[in-house]
Image: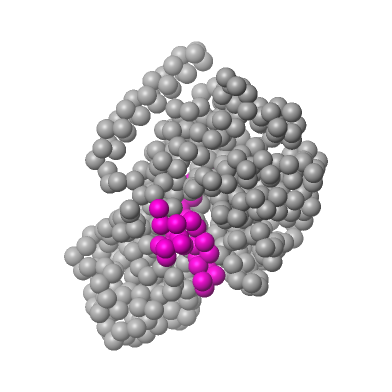
Amino acid sequence: MMKTNVFWYFLFLLMLTAGNASAQKKTAKTYIPWSNGKLVVSEEGRYLKHENGAPFFWLGETGWLLPERLNRDEAEYYLEQCKQRGYNVVQVQTMNNVPSMNAYGQYSLVDGFNFKDINKKGVYGYWDHMDYIIKTAANKGIYIGMVCIWGTPVSKGQMSVKEAQAYGKFLAERYKNEPNVIWFIGGDIRGDVKTAEWEALAKSIRAIDKNHLMTFHPRGRTTSAMWFNKAEWLDFNMFQSGHRRYGQRNGDGDYPIEENTEEDNWRFVDRSFAEKPLKPVIDGEPIYEEIPQGLHDPNETLWNDNDVRRYAYWSVFAGSFGHTYGHNSIMQFIRPGVGGAYGAKKPWYEALNDPGFNQMKYIKNLMLSFPFFDRVPDQSIIAGTNGERYDRAIATRGNDYLMVYSYTGRPMQIDLSKISGARKNVWWYAAKTGKLEYVGEFDSKVVNFQHDSGYISGNDQVLIAVDASKDYVQKGWTELPDAQQKWNK
């Protein structure tokens, strides 16, 4: 029976790949972001951009076990699907264990952390496969966010400071010239656990590779700003808002947000921005689509596409420079014959059709459609009393545009005087579909707004108001054009 399942899996994958290849011929030219120069932190310290000034909105996908579980054909197919949905970063565990083994039965460490003879003639080794993944992603305009080594084996003493230095040197020398690498130190671990090892790894990479950005992937409900904000090697902060619902604190840990606020991932943005110097920040691991609330009990309610959208808009409107999506089945790449944790049962290639995976592109396109670097969070846009938890509206603005996200459709009082212009054009933007709906032109004052679909969780909308003298959005549009194409070269 298992052989039959595997046969149908590969047949299904082949058919999807063939169909996808045909569809690609009709799509726009692949956007290669680094044609605009390498990634750098923007002058105001909140965002990432390319050297020529092109904005970079990070839309990440969580492919943790990609290097270990997918073969070449599967990796190419998966990365192509990410490209088609607008993802420009895929986060992977370069090594999830010490050693790690990939789909070809090859180990990452054939002689411990001695990499002198790592390349064997006539053998497609572990690092050859990693090379293939990085180069394939590059051909599709995708960065690989490389978690160098997951935190669990390091916490168990399986990488010393000396070994971290050797490993960092190996990684930097091998990948310093690849255009699409972003380094992740840590891996679901607190920065005050094995700090010397993490510092050694980061500094050994940075000593050789000064061209790629670097961050730290922390433990759930913490932010790298708690430990490394002043570190020279840390270019931007990352937090893991985690998978718990309100009230699932379980009495564990010293977290930077209050009890019973676990789902308020916007609080981690505020917490990170409170540190000096100011550094860009992103939610690198929010709740995943189809993962149990609280993570470990598969009988709990599963997070769904409504929830992953809410986390994305809350974080970005609070000031994050992008967002990372995750799916319980995709991040583990489970399929017939390969079991999954956290109650995941759906094969990863079927999960690619799930709504959340296909909806994240709308927030990326929205943010790139307006002046990027003058945008700031601004809750003063919401006049009167704001809601709490799911009812909380969150606002962001540039000089001549503002946006307010509402998850439940609760009535809102919006102060249109917070941006330039005596008159403002207003639209609704559906977070679920990316559809635009023109509302009308208004004076520069406080106006009451509520979408006609009413008050219901998951019917999330973004209110967009623009100085009437600006033409970022046209009144007749029913959707936004592809904002990324203006930077295509």
Percent coordinates x, y for residue 427 in the rendering: 29, 69
Horizontal side of residue 24 vs 242, given as left or right:
left
Display colour scheme: one colour
Count up the numbered dots: 0
The residue at the point 29 percent across, 86 percent down is 422
Nearer the observer, 128 or 269: 128
Residue 215 seen by the camera: yes
Horizontal side of residue 195 vs 221, given as left or right:
right
The residue at the point 51 percent across, 39 percent down is 134
Q: Quadrant of residue 403?
A: bottom left
Percent coordinates x, y for residue 197 in the rendering: 77, 49
* Residues drawn in magenta: 35-62
Percent coordinates x, y for residue 318 in the rendering: 51, 68
Percent coordinates x, y for residue 375 in the rendering: 44, 72
Nearer the observer, 372 or 175: 175
Residue 152 seen by the camera: no
Instruction: Say if 14 sits above or below 82 in the image.
Output: above
Horizontal side of residue 292 vs 198, given as left or right:
left
- Asked if residue 459 lies in the magenta stretch, the reply is no
The residue at the point 55 percent across, 30 percent down is 129
Q: Quadrant of residue 25?
A: top left
- Asked if residue 41 lies in the magenta stretch, the reply is yes
The residue at the point 38 percent across, 45 percent down is 85
